[in-house]
Image (cartoon, coloured by chain):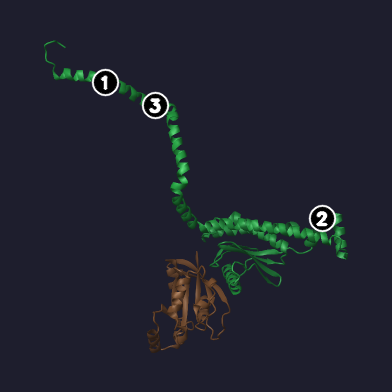
Chain colours: A green, B brown
């Protein structure tokens, strides 16, 4: 710049620019460094992680106090909304647990009776013992095998309150299954109401050489119409099969009655109870 | 196809079973046989091109509805309450009974039916209307079959709505 010449506005601008660069150099460097850290994950992570961790720890320790009420409300609401689903899921599992316990207790009782009768003599007993020793089979199994096994003729899954049919399978077509399901529900309701037994359920209807065994679940029950007598052991076995069936096939299908669910349940009933039985009969012949 | 449970109820001897038989089998008998417990039957009807299967529970008559086992009402979508147009004792508690039924089947459809129309004159019918505190839905005759099909058609249509 020449001495004696008045600085014009352009010169002033250049001077200001230079001055800005000198004054802001340090800040710019710091900003660039910061930008580099922000853009580089490796550099950013160790700096931010402790802060996030601290916040998470803080949230963890304060969560029960801060959000207890909200969580309680949401959980309560969700439980109420899905009450039916939960019960349908739990019912078969709970039933199986109770059955296992009862079966265990019965086994203890049976063992004790077996011990007592071990030394009792009778012509049948001696014959049984000879057969048992010849074939290496337990004598109580031989007695059981002498009794004819019942044959499942029809099986229904019925909505518990309305008596509407949810699925069915049978070895031969008889009268209208919808009507059977309705009448069965009416009989169950009548007996349970008449005797006012609270949570107890009608389980067995016997007529001549036939029997209808029912197994109740939360929102439905399964009725099995059979020919032949049903021993307590067979009843127990059938009950276990029904619990298994309910657990595997009905837990997601029991909520709504529609054509898809009806066809699915019916085909599964056929597969589990009718086809298997017919195959067994053929093998026996 | 949609299936619905329908309860047929009312005092004894009002013609519930006759309505049931007329609807299901299209037949009528003068012989009175009291219903023991309950009888269930099914009929599929077509309403506006859609099929609906009605599972009708014909319940033994009771003087008052609170005497009917409550479990019978569970899962019902519709109720047909029948009274006898010739016997005032069968409709004297009508309002009370209907309120009780509304409470038993919340959201369900209730049809109030005055039966045995063939046994009353126009004048007698007008007298009954004056005696009853609330209007009924339909007047039927299980004997002649008048309005029986129409009753179930109306109910079917409302159940499909």
Does A99 sit left or right of A256 as displayed? right
Residue A274 % position (x, y): 66, 60
The answer to which of B29 and A243 lies nearer the viewer is: A243
Q: Earlier in the sequence, mark 1 or mark 3?
A: 1
Secondary structure beneath disc 1? helix
Distance from Cα at disc 3 to Cα at disc 2:
81 Å
Q: Residue furthest top?
A: A3
- Write the residue at 75% across / 58% down: A108
Q: Which x, y percent locates residue A111?
A: 78, 58
Closer to the chain start, of discs 3 and 2, is: 3
Q: Which residue is mark 2?
A: A137
Disc 1: which residue: A23
* Nearer-N-terminus badge (2/1): 1
Cα separation, mark 1 vs mark 3, equals 23 Å
Would you say A171 lies left or right of A24 here?
Answer: right
Q: Is residue A70 visible?
A: yes
Mark 3 lies on a secondary structure that is: helix
Name the image quarter holding the C terminus of chain A.
bottom right
Q: CA distance from mark 2 to mark 1?
A: 103 Å
Q: Is residue B150 visible?
A: no
In the image, residue A209 above or below residue A89: below
The residue tagged 3 is A37
State whether residue A212 is above or below residue A63: below
How dense is the environment of label 3, judged by Cα within 10 Å: few (below 14), some, or many (20 and up)? some
């Amino acid at each position: 710049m020449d001495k004696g010449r008045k600085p014009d506005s352009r010169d002033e601008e250049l001077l200001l620019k230079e001055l800005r660069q000198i004054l802001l150099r340090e800040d710019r460097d710091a900003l660039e460094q910061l930008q580099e850290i922000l853009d580089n994950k490796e550099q950013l992570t160790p700096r931010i992680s402790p802060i996030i961790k601290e916040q998470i720890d803080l949230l963890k320790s304060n969560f029960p106090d801060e959000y207890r009420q909200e969580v309680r409300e949401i959980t309560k609401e969700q439980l109420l909304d899905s009450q039916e689903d939960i019960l349908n899921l739990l019912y078969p599992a709970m039933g199986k647990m109770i059955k296992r316990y009862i079966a265990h207790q019965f086994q203890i009782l049976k063992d004790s009776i077996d011990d007592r009768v071990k030394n009792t003599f009778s012509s049948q007993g001696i014959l049984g013992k000879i057969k048992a020793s010849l074939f290496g089979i337990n004598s109580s199994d031989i007695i059981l095998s002498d009794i004819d096994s019942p044959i499942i003729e029809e099986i229904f899954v019925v909505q518990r309150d309305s008596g509407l049919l949810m699925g069915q399978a049978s070895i031969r077509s008889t009268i209208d299954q919808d009507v059977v399901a309705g009448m069965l529900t009416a009989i169950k309701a009548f007996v349970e109401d008449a005797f006012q037994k609270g949570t107890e359920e009608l389980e067995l209807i016997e007529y001549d050489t036939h029997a209808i065994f029912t197994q109740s679940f939360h929102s439905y029950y399964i009725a099995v119409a059979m020919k032949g007598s049903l021993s307590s052991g067979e009843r127990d076995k059938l009950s276990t099969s029904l619990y298994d069936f309910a657990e595997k096939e009905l837990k997601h299908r029991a909520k709504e009655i529609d054509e898809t669910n009806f066809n699915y349940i019916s085909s599964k009933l056929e597969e589990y109870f009718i086809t298997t039985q017919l195959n067994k009969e053929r093998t026996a012949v | 196809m949609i299936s619905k449970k329908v309860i047929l109820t009312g005092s004894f001897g009002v013609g519930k079973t006759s309505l049931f038989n007329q609807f299901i089998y299209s037949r009528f008998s003068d012989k009175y046989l009291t219903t023991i417990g309950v009888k269930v039957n099914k009929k599929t009807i077509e309403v506006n091109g859609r099929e609906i299967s009605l599972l009708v529970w014909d319940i033994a008559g009771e003087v008052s509805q609170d005497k009917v086992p409550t479990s019978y009402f569970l899962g019902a979508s519709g109720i047909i309450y029948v009274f006898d147009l010739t016997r005032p004792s069968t409709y004297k508690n009508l309002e009370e009974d209907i309120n009780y039924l509304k409470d038993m089947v919340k959201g369900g459809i209730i049809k109030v039916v005055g039966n045995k129309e063939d046994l009353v004159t126009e004048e007698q019918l007008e007298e009954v209307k004056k005696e009853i505190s609330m209007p009924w839905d339909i007047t039927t005759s299980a004997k002649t079959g008048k309005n029986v099909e129409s009753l179930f058609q109306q109910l079917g249509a409302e159940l499909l709505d």
